[in-house]
Amino acid sequence: MKPELVKDIIDWDIVNWSKALHFWESKHVFDSTAQECLELGGRRGGLSLWMALKGNRVLCSDYEFDETEARKLHEKYNCHERISYQDIDATAIPYKNHFDVIAFKSILGGICRNDNDALKSKTIEEIYAALKPGGKLVFAENLTSSFVHRFMRKRFTNWGAAWNYLDYHEIDAVFSSFKKVELVTIGFFGAFGRTEGQRNFLGKIDNIIAPLVPKSKRYIVAGVAEK
């Protein structure tokens, strides 16, 4: 996959978050037929782009969604005819047993902001209900990580104090409805970068030190969950 395409799919902190993309690819999420797919929290529509380029029919969505930016991205790769757009609240998905694949990246913390922990399970339950039997959820989410991460986020990011990061130790409970969940945790220093250049440099350090960092102290979890 060309670097420009990976950047357009992942959007930020490319070195670390692109490992989620490589993990999903290794799990052969899509079969040889055109599948029905949904991206939640689409914003720029990067995951919709990824799914559409594999020949799938994709619904790109977000809460109070203005699809202008996402549509431009999809037109850039000439896959817009396979993508439609809809305003969807991830805590109240208006589809049941409909999608083969649902994907999201870094949405739980915002949905569940201000310690609204119940919405983590609510969101995942809505996704589960919207998937067909045997359907798959493909996701990547920010983890609470270390004390240093929590301190720096609150100090240096506008949303850090309100964002409700997923804790490594609550993953099993939040995704307990699924019959199979495969996970990988990623990154440590990349979260501290203030610019994309800094994040890329720190991500390369993460590539070196990864075996030394406990899974619960990494700051990204990526997974594939099967209904």
Image (spheres, helix red, strand yellow):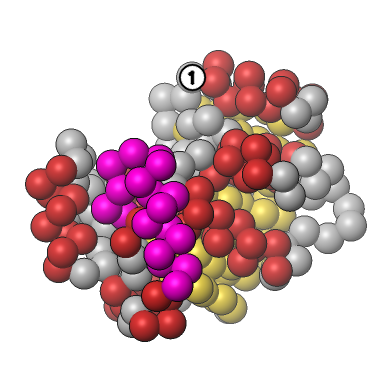
Residue 110 sits above or below residue 222 on the image: above
Residue 50 placement (x, y as % from top left): 69, 44
Q: Could one spot residue 26 in this view of the protein?
A: yes
What's the residue at 70%, 70% (across, down)?
27
Q: Is residue 7 left or right of residue 215?
A: right
Q: Is residue 114 left or right of residue 126?
A: left
In the picture of the structure, the residue carrying the numbered disc 1 is 66
Residue 58 sits above or below residue 224 on the image: above
Of 194 and 157, the residue lying toward us: 194
Of 164 and 91, the residue lying toward us: 164
The residue at the far right in this view is 32
Q: Could one spot residue 91 in this view of the protein?
A: no
> What quarter of the picture does the C terminus occupy?
bottom right
Which SS type dominates the magenta stretch? helix
Q: Is residue 6 magenta?
A: no
What's the residue at 63%, 19% (across, down)?
72
Question: Quarter-wise, where is residue 170 in the image?
Answer: bottom left
Q: Is residue 195 magenta?
A: yes
Say what amino acid the circle numbered 1 marks: Asp
What's the residue at 34%, 70% (across, down)?
218
What's the residue at 10%, 46% (across, down)?
155
Q: Which residues are magenta?
A: 191-208
Residue 213 sits above or below residue 108 on the image: below
Of 75 and 42, the residue lying toward us: 75
Residue 216 placement (x, y as % from top left): 31, 77
Residue 112 placement (x, y as % from top left): 27, 50
- Tag 1: Cα neighbours inside 10 Å, few (<14), some, or many (≥20)? some
SS at circle 1: loop
Residue 189 placement (x, y as % from top left): 32, 61
Question: Quarter-wise, where is residue 196 in the image?
Answer: top left
